Amino acid sequence: MITKDDIIKIADFGISKRLEGTEDSMTQIGTICYMSPECHNGENYNTKSDIWALVVILYELCALRRPFHHISLYILIKQIIEEEPKPISDLYSEELKDLLRRMLSKDPEERPNIQEVLAHPLLKSNAVAPTQQTGRETVIDIRKTITIDKYKTIMTDNHKLLKTQKTMINTHTGTSSQHTLKITTLARPKRTLTSDGPIETISNDEFTLHNKGVSLHNMKLYEEAIKFYDKAIEMNPKFAKAYYGKGLALDSLKKHKEAIRFFDKALEMNPNHANAYYSKGLALDNMKLYEEAIIFYDITIGINPKYVDAYYCKGLALKNLGRYEEAINNYDKIIEIEPTYANAYYSKPIALENLKQYEKAIKYYDKAIELDPTSTNAYYGKGLALDSM
């Protein structure tokens, strides 16, 4: 959540359980990308799993992407259990990289506990005095260092952490301790988003309304989300993200024509909004206007040549138009960019089957099954291809 004072708070602890001392838990519920390797392995876990969830957030704040990401849940879980994430940019200090590496250890015993995290020299040496905005909380200022040459170093503000505050809670049954950790950005009255298009200046209140809309959208409460997007737009008629968010909500409600109108409005505010072009393509696709959809997928790819979802949807549109060889070329491009994109290996053989290239199709179904053994569609497609030979 983002408060009106621009403080980002970790929330949604509705199913959380307080663990006492070294107590372990076996509850298996949560958001997959934030769950630790031991959780995915079905093992008992403790507070070191909270360290894992925290470092996923910290990594995402630094890299603007999660340490592990894949469209296939099977592959995502496999990555979390077995693979190492890409290092964050060299723009960040070695101290910060080291802290993230330790917190991302697959072995929970090798992960630091929260006291060790806060005692890390990077955090300890950057503590600043409390302010009126943060009350009794101690603020930790993490900075990223950009080295221009060996004589000059520029320090740019990145993020603050509010130091864990240990609060003793007295109850009728005894005394327990509670650890809380908050994350905040540097205080600022306004935020400016820049792109190759116009600059839009957005107040914290508008961001709060927009983010509430996003949260409701993620809960599939689309009508409620639209109300908050409308409030954000009313506050600032040039808020491209709010128009885009409303377009997504309308498209989820199958109001595709109306959704396109709001994607166009977002593009009017920001002509380089790749996601808006892509989403407009999807809306046209849902209306079976495949030729028109392809135009907007191509624009998306022009802005971001590695936008694999745009290639994938373009391939589906081409397949629906009977342009199978062109569709195959799109799937090949996806595989070139992201070799583990399972859907490309599943969709390419469907186009190959339409060209009666069954043996080639089976090879790609096999690859799709290798990448995602839970893909019933790949098994079914392979069966059909075998039956057609």
Image (cartoon, grey):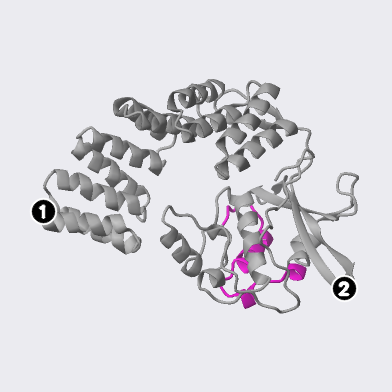
- Whether the magenta-drawn stretch holds residue 107 is answered as yes
Dot 1: few (<14), some (14–19), or many (≥20) neighbours within 10 Å? few
Q: Residue at x 68, y 57 (%)?
A: 14
Of helix, strand and loop, which one carries label 2? strand
Q: Is the residue 115 above or below the residue 257 in the image?
A: below
* Amino acid on which the number 1 mark rests in the picture: Ser
**Numbered circle sitting on residue 158:** none
Q: Can residue 194 be seen here?
A: no
* Amino acid on which the number 2 mark rests in the picture: Thr
Which corner quadrant of the image does residue 109 belong to? bottom right
The C terminus sits in image quarter = bottom left
Whole-percent x and y of residue 47? 68, 71
- Alpha carbon distance from label 1 to label 2: 70 Å
Mark 1 or 2 closer to N-term?
A: 2
Q: Mark 2 points at which residue?
A: 175
Q: What span is in magenta?
A: 88-116
- Whether the magenta-drawn stretch holds residue 350 is answered as no
Q: Can residue 71 be seen here?
A: yes
Q: Point out the residue furthest to the front here.
A: 172
Q: Residue at x 66, y 48 (%)?
A: 146
Dot 2: few (<14), some (14–19), or many (≥20) neighbours within 10 Å? few
Question: In the visual, does 4 lie left or right of 341?
Answer: right
Of helix, strand and loop, which one carries label 1? helix
Q: Residue at x 27, y 48 (%)?
A: 347
Along the viewing direction, whichever of 376 and 235 lies nearer the viewer: 376
Along the viewing direction, whichever of 82 and 366 lies nearer the viewer: 366
Whole-percent x and y of residue 165? 84, 61
Q: Mark 1 points at which residue?
A: 388
Whole-percent x and y of residue 178? 80, 66
